[in-house]
Structures are given as C-alpha cells and as structure tokens.
Image (spheres, helix red, strand yellow):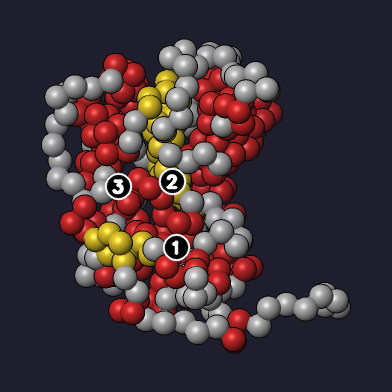
Amino acid sequence: MSSKYRQFDRNKLKVLPLAERKSLIDTGLIEALKPCAEVHPSLEAVAKELAAARDKSSARVLMIGAHVIRSGMQRYLFDLMEKGLINCIAVNGACVIHDFEFALLGQTTECVATYISNGQFGLWQETGQLNEIISKGNAQGLGFGEAVGKYISENKLPHAEISIFAKAYELGIPVTVHAGIGYDIIHEHPNCDGAVIGEASYRDFLIFAAQLEALEHGVVMNFGSAIMAPEIYLKTLAMVRNAAANSNAGAIRNFTTLVCDLHDLPEKVGTEAPKNDAQYYFRPWKTMLVRTVADGGRSFYVRGFHNQTIPQLWTAATKL
C-alpha cells in the first residue's frame, strides 16, 4: 500500500557542477595556532576539567554547529583532539557538507539569497556525492560520520588535511552526525535515500549515547548549536542514567557542561529564565546549564564568537 498523496518528482531537478557555483569562503580562513593574550576564567576552568577527565578516562565531548567549521577553527580542534582533550564530536548535517566541500575543493558556502532566487540552492553535483558515500558506509555498518571520515581519509581528497571528519577517523575519535530529514541540501538530490540517512544517523545517535556512559567526571561542550546539541544530549543522558540505575553502575551526576554562544545571558546561569522571557526558549541554557547539572554538576557560559572562544580554550589547555 502506498500513500494517496502525490510526491515531488526529483527527476525534474537540474543539478549543476560546483564549478558553476560562487563559493563564499575558502581554506584561507583556516587559522594557524596562536595563543591568546587573555583567556576567559570560565574557559580556564573548563580546560582543567578536560585534563582531569582525560586522566580519569571520562568523556570529553564537543558538540558544534556548522559555523564552527566556517570560522576556521580546524587546527585548534585538531590539537585538542591530539592532546586527548576531545574524544567525541557531535555535529549536525550542515557540518558534514562544509567539511566535505572544504576537503574536496578547498572552498564552501553558497549565497542563499543568490541561488534560492532561481531554485539552484543546494543542487550541486559534487556535494551530492555524500549520499553515495553515506549509503556505501551504511551498507558496511558504519555510522554517518565514520563513513564520511573514512572516505575523505582513504581517498586522500585534495584538502583532507583540514577535514575534521578525516582527522577524527585517523585518531579513532567518533564524529556523530545528527541529521534532520529535509534540513540539509543533500536531501534535495535525486540520489538521496531517506532510509539510509535515518539508519546511519540513528547509529550515530547510539554511538554518541555510548560515549556518554563515561560522562561521570567528564565534560560536555556546546559551541553554537541551539537545537541539535541540547536535544540529543538530553535524550542520551536520560538513556545512560537509566541504564546506569538499572545495572547499579553508579549515578552520572558529577560532570561539567560548557556553552559558548552569542546570546546575552546573565553572568550566573544556574537558574533558568522565566517562561515569559524569550531566553527561556534558548535550549542550551535550561537544558545544558541548569536542569541536567542540578544534581551535582557544574556549568559555564561564555559569550563570544567561535574564533574567540575556541582559541582561548586551546590557550588554556596548552598551559596545563
């Protein structure tokens, strides 16, 4: 039995090569490592918590939105990964696209205003290769992020050296991709298989949950993800706390959370905003900074752009 509703025919689409797209950024924006003269005290505190978590083999989780990749922070993250201060990275689907385009062509990001006017937004041939990569990896039982990292690394794409996915794959660090169907430009393409996206991304969700089983004395950081990060963190934390209680493995209460974003939050974020305040609906605050650390954890919020906060965190970490 099939749906009684008509579906869009993707064979109508015209998918063009990326050579015909004007990209807005290239690898020239990727910054070299440079210590910061000043470091926010909260980032110094979190750097110490990361080092302690590493020494205890507890989780050191980084959750990011796509603007982190577009801010040129790759080398800072690579060094934190190599130092053992990050052992899991969670991303949304847009991160995959920017990382892959960077690795393949050394450039990424289109002007939405320009390309949506003629309906060409997102419909680029090379970017659509991701659907085939994910499908092949899924058939092998790989997670979404693992499949992409493996492909970039093993095929030695022209700019693989600045790929977060490739670096993580080579270091044995899981990058989990938490896709929302219809959110990402590769879902427009005729070769997109929604079942594959769902299966590979759900596998990553379970991989992420397994990482949080070691969250006691660990750290979870969120740079610029207002929806994906707090939501998957909330659900997986419930799962691992439930499993720990059922197996008498010990409570998961003593850990640290960090949120870095541009919202103008109060200095003390230990109490959530009232429901008549728009900030109440900023999920990282109430979820990551208040509710989930209420039973023994610590939380920090630092306001700033990613090219300010990530170098500061790295600077603090290099002093330990």
Q: Which is more foreground, mark 2 or mark 1?
A: 1
Residue 296, percent from left and from top: 53, 13
Q: Is residue 85 visible?
A: no
User: Which of the two labelled residues, at mark 1 and mark 3, occupies the earlier sequence position?
Assistant: 3
Residue 166, percent from left and from top: 31, 58
Which residue is denoted by mark 2 in the rendering? 65
Residue type for callout 2: Gly
Q: Nearer the viewer, residue 7 or 167?
A: 7
Q: Is residue 286 left or right of residue 80?
A: right
Residue 268, percent from left and from top: 47, 13
User: Which of the two labelled residues, at mark 2 and mark 1, occupies the earlier sequence position?
Assistant: 2
Disc 1 on helix, strand or loop? helix
Residue type for callout 3: Ser
Please rate how many residues cluster around mark 3, counting C-alpha atoms within 10 Å: few if below 14, some from 14 to 19, many from 20.
Answer: some
Residue type for callout 1: Val
Residue 147 to residue 267: above or below: below
Residue 89 to residue 155: above or below: above
Q: Is residue 6 visible?
A: yes
Which residue is denoted by mark 3 in the rendering? 71
Q: Nearer the viewer, residue 305 or 173?
A: 305
**Residue 158 picture quarter:** bottom left
Q: Identify the residue shown where x is 50% and y is 84%.
A: 14
Which residue is denoted by mark 1 in the rendering? 112
Disc 2 on helix, strand or loop? loop
